[in-house]
Amino acid sequence: MTGRPFILDPLFQSTKSVPGVGPRMTKLLEKVAGPRVSDLFWHLPAGVIDRRFSPKLRDLVGIAEAVATLTIRIEGHFPPKRPGLPYRIKGTDGTGWIDLTFFHALADYLEVQFPVGEERVVSGRIEHYNGLLQMPHPDYITTVETAHQIPAIEPVYPLTAGLTQKVSLKIMRAALSKIPVMDEWLDPAYQQREQLPRWHEAVQSVHNPDNEQAVSPEHPARKRLAYDELLANQLTMALLRQNQQAQKGRSLPGDDALFARALEAFSFDLTGSQKTAIAEVRADMRKPTRMHRLLQGDVGSGKTAVAFLAAIHAIGSGAQAAIMAPTEILARQHEKTISKLAAKLGLKTVTLTGRDKGKVRNEILAAIADGSAHIVIGTHALFQEDVAFRDLALVIIDEQHRFGVHQRLLLSEKGATADMLVMTATPIPRTLTLTVYGDMEVSVLSEKPAGRQPIDTRLVSDERLEEVLQGLQRKIEAGERIYWVCPLVEESEKLDLAAAEERFKMMALRFRRVGLLHGRMKPPEKDKVMEQFAKGELDILVSTTVIEVGVDVPEATVMVIEHAERFGLAQLHQLRGRIGRGTGKSACILLYNPKCSEIAKKRLATIRDSEDGFYISEQDLKLRGAGEMLGTRQSGVPEFRLAHPEFHASLIETAFDDARLILDRDPQLLSPRGLALRTLLYLFERDTAIKYLRSG
C-alpha cells in the first residue's frame, strides 16, 4: 500500500467541492476551519441553540432573555418614522403581544413574509424593551404548515466576519454527505468498553448535537474523535522512536577516573534525582543504539550539571560533545558555567554563535574539526554546513520546546551516530510530555539543589505602584539588585519594546543606575548591559521577557513583573526563577490590574502559593488549555483540533500504551487493523510517519 488511500480523496478536496461554496466562501472557510473538506469535519460546534421552548406570550413576562419558538397572528406593520429606527411588526397569540423588529429592512419583503391577519411561526431571541416583548430579526420565519422545518436543536459554529450561522449550517450539511465509511482502526475491546461509535457515526453525531451535553468533550462521539487524533499523534511518535532505536549508534564506555574527577570539580553534592538522571544517561550511552532522552527539570534544578557529566562521559570515550542553546545569551551562560568546570579537568571548551566572524570563527572551526575542542557550545550556528566535528558523539539541546520535532530530526542527522539529550526547564504535565516528547525516554529532576532560597511572592495591585518604587529605593540602599520586567503587549515585539523603553525612561529619572535589555538589541549590547548588572554597576535592569531563560545573576534578589495578569503561568514561573539563586532572601512582586478576569486572578494566586513548576503547569493546563499554555510562538507543541489535553488526559495515556502495543505486534502495520491505522495516519496528515514503515 503506497500513497494516500483513495477512500480519503473526497476529504482532501478543496472546500470548493462542497455544493454552495464559491470562491468568496472558500476564503472565509479557510479562515475559520481550513482549506479542505476534512477541515470542516474538525471544525466542531462550540455550543447549541435549543428551539424547543414554545411558550405562550403571557409566560414570557419576567423571563430575562431566552430563545423561543412562537406561533402568532400578524396584527399590523409599523414602518420607522425616521432613519435609524427599526421596522416593527405587531403579533399576538391571544395571551399577550410581541413586536418583531427589523433594522435596514425592505418593507415590500416584510409585507409578503408577514401578511396581516395570517399566522406565522417565528424562532429567535426574546428581549424586553421599554416594558414590551420583542424579537429582533427572527432566525426562522415559517407558516404553521412548514413549522416542522425549524430545527429543534441547532449547532453553533465559531464564525468570522461575512460567515453566518445559517450559511455555516448549510455548508456543514452538504460536507457531511461526503463522509466515507472506513475500516475500524480502534481496538475492538477498548471501543466496546468505552462505548465509542464508529468514525463516520462520530463525525455525524458531533455535527448534529441533540442536547447541550453533545458538545461536551466528555461526549462519546467527541471522545472518539479526540482519541483518533491522539492515537495518530502517539503512533507517529512510536514510529519515530522505533526508527531511532533501529538506527545504528555506538557504545560509549566512558572513563570512570575522568568521571570521578568531574564530580570533584563541583562545589556541591548532586541531589538524588541528579544522580538517578546521570545514571540513566550513562546507561543509555553505553548501549549500541542511539540515545534519545529528555531531561526535564524545574527552574534551578541543576540540569547543567547533568549535561556536563554526560559530556564528560562522551569525552572519556575519546569523542566530542555539543551543547546547543536557542539564544546567544543562553549559549554564553552555558559557556561561563561549563568552561570553568572543564578547565579544572584540562579540557577545552569553545563557543560558536552567529556573531563569530573571520579569523576568530576560523580558529573555532579548526578546533572543532581537529578535535582539540572537547565541548562545543553554540546556537543553531553549530549546525551550519561548514561546521565539521572530528568525532561528535553527544548532542545536548537546551530548551527543546523552542525547536520542535522537525529540527530534532535535522540535528540528529549532523552526528551520524550521535546520542541525543534534550533538556527543558519548562515543566510540562506528564500528559503533554507524551504528546510533545512521546518519541523519547524521560528523566525528571524533581528536587532543587541545596542552598536555593524560597522566594517570597506577593500580589500587589498596580494602584500601589508608588509604594513599590519607594520599597525599591530601600532595597538599593541595602545593596540589592532588581529585575523589572515589562508587560507583554499583544504578540508584538515592537509594542513590548515601546512599553519597556517608556518604563526605563521613568525609572532612569528616579533612580541613578538603571539599564535596559530587550530582544532587538545587538548581542554585544545585550552582553554589555548584562555584564554591568552582574558586576553591580547597575541596580535595576528594566527588561522585556528576554531574561526568561538562562540569565544568572545570584546577587539579584528582587523581581517586579508589571501587568502580571498578561503572562502565562509557565512564563511567570520561568521569570521568577531568575532570582533566589544566591544566599540572600528573594522577593517577587506581581503587579496586576485588579479589574482583570477571575481566571487571571486564579493564575496569579497559583504562582503566589507554589514554587513547584510541575504543580503550576498542571494548574495552567486546567485554566488555559494546552496551546495557550505553552505559547503560540513555541513550535514544539502539536496543535490539536479535536483533543483537549486538559479534558482528555486519560486518553493520551491510553493512546501512548496502545501505540506501543500495536507496533510490538505489527511493526510494519500490515495486519487488517494495521492497514486501517495507516489510513488513520493519512487522515491526520502524519505522512512522515508512513515513511518510517520500511515496507509499503
Image (cartoon, rainbow, N blue to C red):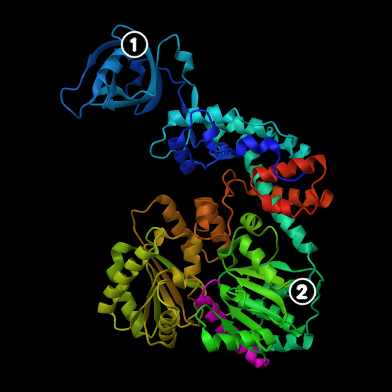
Q: Magenta residues, as a range?
A: 326-346
The residue carrying pointer 1 sits among few (fewer than 14), some (14 to 19) or many (20 or more) residues within 10 Å by Cα, namely some
Residue at position x 41%, y 66% in the image: 458
Please give the residue where the numbered disc 1 appears in the rendered image. 93
Which badge, 2 or 1, is on the more N-terminal residue?
Answer: 1
Q: Amino acid at mark 1?
A: Asp
Residue 592 location in percent, x, y?
36, 61
The one of 482 and 692 positioned closer to us in this rendering: 692
Residue at position x 33%, y 25% in the image: 137
Q: Is residue 588 magenta?
A: no
Evaluate whether residue 319 shows in this view: yes
The residue carrying pointer 2 sits among few (fewer than 14), some (14 to 19) or many (20 or more) residues within 10 Å by Cα, namely many
Q: Is residue 329 magenta?
A: yes
The one of 15 and 432 positioned closer to us in this rendering: 15
Q: Amino acid at mark 2?
A: Met
Please give the residue where the numbered disc 2 appears in the rendered image. 285
Task: Answer with left or right where residue 518 lies relative to residue 333.
Answer: left
- Mark pair 2, 1: CA separation: 82 Å
Residue 299 location in percent, x, y?
55, 71
User: From the image, which quarter does the N terminus lie in?
Assistant: top right
